[in-house]
Image (cartoon, rainbow, N blue to C red):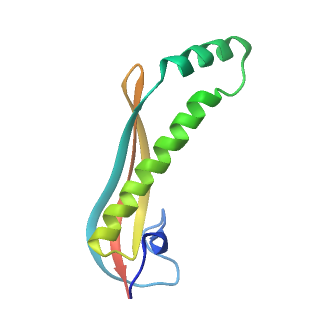
Amino acid sequence: MIISRSDILVVTTEAVPGREIDHALGMVRGSTVRAKHIGSDIVAGLRNLVGGEVKEYASLLAGAREQAYDRMVEQAFEMGAHAIVACRMETSTIQQAASEVLFYGTAVRLK
């Protein structure tokens, strides 16, 4: 079975419904650390005064999630995986102005 990166199934469950796992290839992960831009920080600070969604930070974190996810899928693809099971996402603050986003799971080959 030849697959492309976009064919890799990613699930949060321990198995892929309707498919049987042939063998586990190992843990895969993707992460990125993003820092706030001074201009965005000023605008976000002003937005805090009036309330509502802080779109500058939401956009920053959405991009970070996408990049970390893509890096995890790329690692699984390079290992020859068909799927990633037990996928999880974590975030942490590195310092006041920077956050890490991490995706991880188990790369598997399916029968």
Say whether residue 92 is left or right of residue 46. Answer: left
Q: Please tell me which residue is depicted at 43% across the width and 38% down the height of the picture.
A: 91
Residue 104 appears in the figure: no
Say whether residue 40 is left or right of residue 82. Answer: right
Residue lying furthest front in this view?
A: 39
Residue 74 appears in the figure: yes
Say whether residue 24 is left or right of residue 52. Answer: left
Q: Where is residue 88 drawn, in percent x and y?
A: 43, 53
Q: Is residue 104 above or below residue 110?
A: above
Q: Is residue 56 above or below residue 103?
A: above
Give the quadrant of the C terminus: bottom left
Q: Where is residue 30 drawn, in percent x and y?
A: 35, 52
Q: Please tell me which residue is depicted at 41% across the width and 80% down the height of the picture.
A: 3
Q: Please tell me which residue is depicted at 34% across the width and 70% down the height of the picture.
A: 77
Q: Where is residue 110 drawn, in percent x and y?
A: 38, 83
Q: Please tell me which residue is depicted at 52% across the width and 78% down the height of the picture.
A: 17
1, 109: nearer the viewer: 1
